Amino acid sequence: MRRLWLTFAQTVTICVAVLFVVKTLKPEWLPHLPSTNNGYPEVATVVEAPAGSAALRPSSYADAAKRALPAVVHIFTTQEVKGPRDPFTNDPIFRHFFGDRFGELSQRRSGLGSGVVVSPEGYILTNYHVVDGADEIEVAHSDGRKYKARVVGTDPESDLAVLRIPADHKLPVIAFGSSENLRVGDVVLAIGNPFGVGQTVTSGIVSALGRSHLGINTFENFIQTDAAINPGNSGGALVDANGHLVGINTAIYSQSGGSMGIGFAIPVSLAKNVMEQIVKTGGVTRGWVGVEVQEITEELAESFKLSGTSGALIAGVMRGSPADKAGIRPGDVLTQVAGQKVKDAQGMLELIAALEPEKPASFLLRRDGKDIDLNVVIGKRPKPTRER
C-alpha cells in the first residue's frame, strides 16, 4: 500500500511540474485555462474591423467639411496708409524744387480674412473689420480662382459686411442651418484661412450661447466655441455636423494673439437678416428712441423699490428724440417694449432696434413706484460715427 501511495504522489508531482512548465513557457497550448501573465493584468486584444466596415469606424466629419469647404473663400485686402508730413516740406526752397509730392508719406497695408459664398449671384458674407478701409479686395477660391470684389454694404454695429464677385462661373454656395436649434455641446467646425496658411478646418463644440456684454460689437448675441479660431479666420464659416452654416466666425478671447479655446461667432439668423437688408437697401435700418440706459444693480433696485434687477434704467433722454416727445424721463425704469420684457440694458437696445421706424410702440415704465404705459413713435437709428 505504501509503495502504491508513493507511486501516485510521484505521478502527481511530475504532472504538476509539467503543467507549470507548459503554462509558463507555452501558455497558448492551454487556451482553455486562464493565464496569470506572470502576475501582470491581461491586455485585451483589439479586433480590427474589416476594410470598408462603418460599424466600428471612428466618427468623421469629412462629409460635413466636404459640403462646406467649396463655399468658404479667402479675402485679401490692401489699403493705402498715409503718414505724417515730412518736416522738410515746410522749407520753401525744398518745395520749389520738389513740389508737394513728398508732402505725405504713404505705404500699402495688406490684410487677410475669410468669407462665405451665400448666393449663386456672387454675394459673400464676411466681417466688417475684414474689409474696413480697404482700397482693393480680392477673393480667392480654394480651387485657385480669383476675383476682384466690391462692397455691397456694411453694418459696423454687428461687424458684418456683404461683398459681391462676378457670377461668371457656377459658384459653390453654402447651405444655411439654424442657429436657434443649436445646443451647448453640439459639434461645430470652423473653416477659414488662419494666418494665411490656406483653407483650414478645425473642430470643437458649442461652449455657450447668447454671449453678450463683451464689448466687441454694439449688438452681441454670440455663439461661443472652442473650435480653434485664429487671425485670418474672421468672416469664415462656423458649420454644424451636417456642413450647414450656423455662424460667422468673428472674434477670439486671447492673451497671446492665437487661439485659447474661446472663440465667438455671429449667429446665422442675425447674419442672414443683416445680409438681406444690405442686399435690398444697401444698409441696415434699426429702431431708435434716443435714450441713455444703465444696468440695474441690487442697490439701484432697492433705491427704486423694484422687485428685482430686470429692466433698464433711463439715465438720459436726448432732447427732441422720440423718447423725449413721448414723455420718457431720466429715472424711469423701462420694463417692457412692445409687450416683450426687458431683461437688461443690452436686451432693451436689441428690442428697440428690431422695431420698425416711424411706427408707434408701447413702452411700459416704472415711475415713482407706479407703472405707466407710453406710446413712442420709433425713430431711425443714426449711423455710428467712424472712429479715426
Image: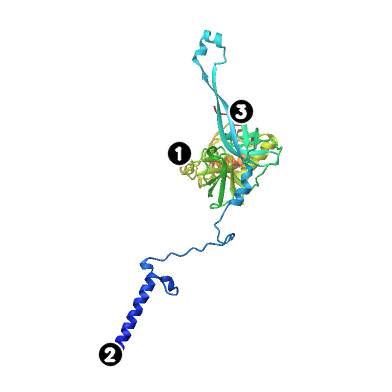
Nearest to the observer: residue 190 or residue 386: 190
Q: Mark 2 or mark 1, which has the lower sequence index?
A: 2
Q: Which secondary structure, mark 1?
A: loop
Q: Mark 3 or mark 1, which has the lower sequence index?
A: 3
- Residue picked out by circle 3: 135
Nearest to the observer: residue 214 or residue 94: 94
**Circle 2: residue type:** Arg
- Residue picked out by circle 2: 2
Q: Residue 70 carries which label?
A: none
Q: Is residue 181 visible?
A: no
Contact (Cβ within 8 Å) of mark 2 with mark 1? no
What residue is at 68 percent from the left and 37 percent from the top?
279
Q: What is the distance, in whole Å, between disc 3 and disc 1 at their CAs?
A: 29 Å
Residue 128, horizontal then vertical, whole percent: 59, 35
Q: What is the distance, in whole Å, between disc 2 and disc 1 at their CAs?
A: 88 Å
Quadrant where the C terminus is found in the figure: top right
Q: How crowded is mark 3: few (under 14 residues within 10 Å), some or many (20 or more)?
A: some
Q: What is the distance, in whole Å, between disc 3 and disc 2 at their CAs?
A: 111 Å
**Circle 1: residue type:** Ser
